[in-house]
Amino acid sequence: MKNFKRYTVTSALPYANGPVHIGHLAGVYVPADIYCRYLRLKGEDVVFIGGSDEHGVPITLRARKEGVSPQDVVDRYHNLIKKSFEDFGISFDIYSRTSNKTHHETAQEFFLTLYNKGELIEKTEEQFYDEVENQFLADRYILGTCPKCGAEDAYGDQCEKCGSSLSPSELINPRSAISGSKPVLKETKHWYLPLDKYEQELRNWILEEHKEWKPNVYGQCKSWLDSGLMPRAVTRDLDWGVPVPLKEAQNKVLYVWFDAPIGYISATKKLTPHWEKYWKDPDTKLVHFIGKDNIVFHCIIFPSMLKHEGSYILPDNVPANEFLNLEGDKISTSRNWAVWLHEYLEEFPGKQDVLRYVLCANAPETKDNDFTWKDFQTRNNSELVAIYGNFVNRALVLTHKYFEGKVPEPKIITEYEYSLKEEVRRIKTAIENNIENYRFREALREAMNISRLGNKYLADTEPWKIFKTDPERVATILYYSIQLCAISTVLTEPFLPFTSKKLLNILNINNINWEETEKFDLIPINHTLNKPELLFEQIDDSTIEKQIEKLLKTKEINQKQVKNIAPQKETINYEDFAKLDLRIGTILEAEKVPKADKLLKLTIDTGLDKRIVVSGIAEFFTPQQIIGQKVCILINLASRKLRGIESQGMILMAKDTDGKLNFVTVNNTCDNGSEVS
């Protein structure tokens, strides 16, 4: 195995359109942080890179829904995510963002290098276009019926109900998510990364040179390669993102999958002027920590970009985890089915390490795992409190009781003490092997064995029973127990950094180097210890019940939303219905009604005339969004004054289960004045 001079460790950039939850932590950030903390304890040169992914369609969709700018959205969530990571102890050397100037310049430079080397191919093809909004539609801006399961609001890239990957052309009755109109196909030019051209070199690099990669990573890569790679667009028609640095690419930006991983590079540039040694020196080990949904980007696409740019190293490993479920159900941002990090930190102050411990002990390293609040409670009470906390407290309390809080001098050393030293060496080596092979659950289990060893040592030797008859033996026992506590501060620090810091303060010592842990003289004789404090506290049933009740309320809300369909109204005769004069019209003008948050004043061409309609849709649409929109209008409704404006009709709208209004979609080929019957 090659020895490296330095390490560049990246963690997947969280999308800045929502907070971080425990699935993100278990899959990416806790294992990455453990790895980096371990490397630092070993004295290695390591940079730990993080940042927010701030481009892409979901952000523009949220901004449009909230009536704010995309920058407002990313500013809000970037700050929330960054603070949550800091408070949770994720030890990034830098937490950057992809909306900053350095990133834009770095991504554009990267694109131009590939472009000038002839590595990108240019293609003109038809894509969906919204004629009402006068813009091309990204996949996520297209909704329609899923051809696989029949769900009515599938996206152009995926059906969230059945999970099927889709293309916009597969949708039944596609419509624009912006205007609700039926999109048309229109030619547009884009640039592509020719992955098919790189297929054989990727096959050699991954399948032959990296057989040590985790089975889930290796297997997914093999599946992609065996299916055959296709060119992948690196640009798209949007107004939010990194502008494509070509004159012929007006109103185009770099595709988010292309610019986001370059964010690792731009973040390192902001961190240090010596950034190139972390990205271009073959003596640097590059490791990407990601979730399984990002495997293809970090194992196939980004390495292809790095290799064909020509000056960058390739990743040595991509230790992707599987998914973490919550109480037997898939974590879902849209359904609010999650444990959000910022809320956990507020509701469990001072218990960062409890969550870190549980997420590592139950990490989805080889398969999807489940987080439950009962397991969280059990692991805290039965492991952290009963094993680690119990040993440390007993050792410290006895030392204060028998030796006034000063480390005693060992007098009588037996084979038991020599066996302790051998077992610590074994544990230390096991932790190293497991961390370096990305088996963090096993590494944590070994780190906890120090406390198990200490508890057994005290139980076997029973110093409280022999102090009166053999105080010299008790001095030895407590000397070795205190040394085990000191060793724990180091070997558990990557997993439980807040606890290690607390224990260092209780022991009244400074940080200890990783390699010193095999020694049993970390704390000198007669060193004064501070008063004992409990490292962990019991978590009671009522605390857990509150969290379970919180989830149950979320589940009830979700179930109500699914079932929130109004019952049928009373039956009417055909003659009643026939009195309604429903026509097709086009909104020509729209403006807000002064001092009325919900009302818009619309001028509508009904085919018969142009009339004013006041409509309560301002919460859901801006005037600019709906000009040109085809609508269904009831024209023979008795007029009435609203805020002093005479309204001559009513437009038909549909309310979804979230309470949001949507236009009743009308085919653009229908003429104004066409009767609806």
Image (cartoon, rainbow, N blue to C red):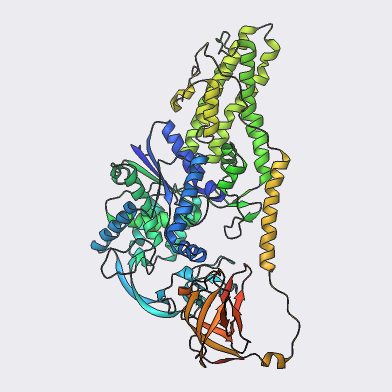
Identify which residue is drawn at 57% across, 82% down. Answer: 646
Quadrant including the C terminus: bottom right
Residue 123, horizontal then vertical, whole percent: 32, 73
User: Eyeballing the image, is 554 above or below 152?
Assistant: above
Of all residues shown, which one is farthest toward the front? 644
Identify which residue is drawn at 53% across, 29% down. Answer: 500
User: Eyeballing the image, is 187 above or below 206?
Assistant: below
Nearest the viewer among 412 and 166 is: 166
Nearest the viewer among 194 and 348 is: 348
Identify which residue is drawn at 52% across, 67% down. Answer: 158
Residue 450, horizontal then vertical, whole percent: 57, 27
Identify which residue is drawn at 71% across, 90% down. Answer: 576
Q: Report the label total.
A: 0
Quadrant including the N terminus: top left
Of all residues shown, which one is farthest toward the left? 116
On screen, residue 251 versus residue 676, left or right, reads: left
Q: Is residue 427 visible?
A: no
Residue 628, horizontal then vertical, whole percent: 46, 81
Residue 595, horizontal then vertical, whole percent: 54, 69
Q: Is residue 104 visible?
A: yes
On screen, residue 559 versus residue 63, left or right, reads: right
Q: Quadrant of residue 405?
A: top right
User: Eyeballing the image, is 448 above or below 236?
Assistant: above
On screen, residue 114 versus residue 530, left or right, reads: left
On screen, residue 110 versus residue 334, left or right, reads: left
Nearest the viewer among 366 and 637 is: 637
Of all residues shown, which one is farthest toward the top? 469
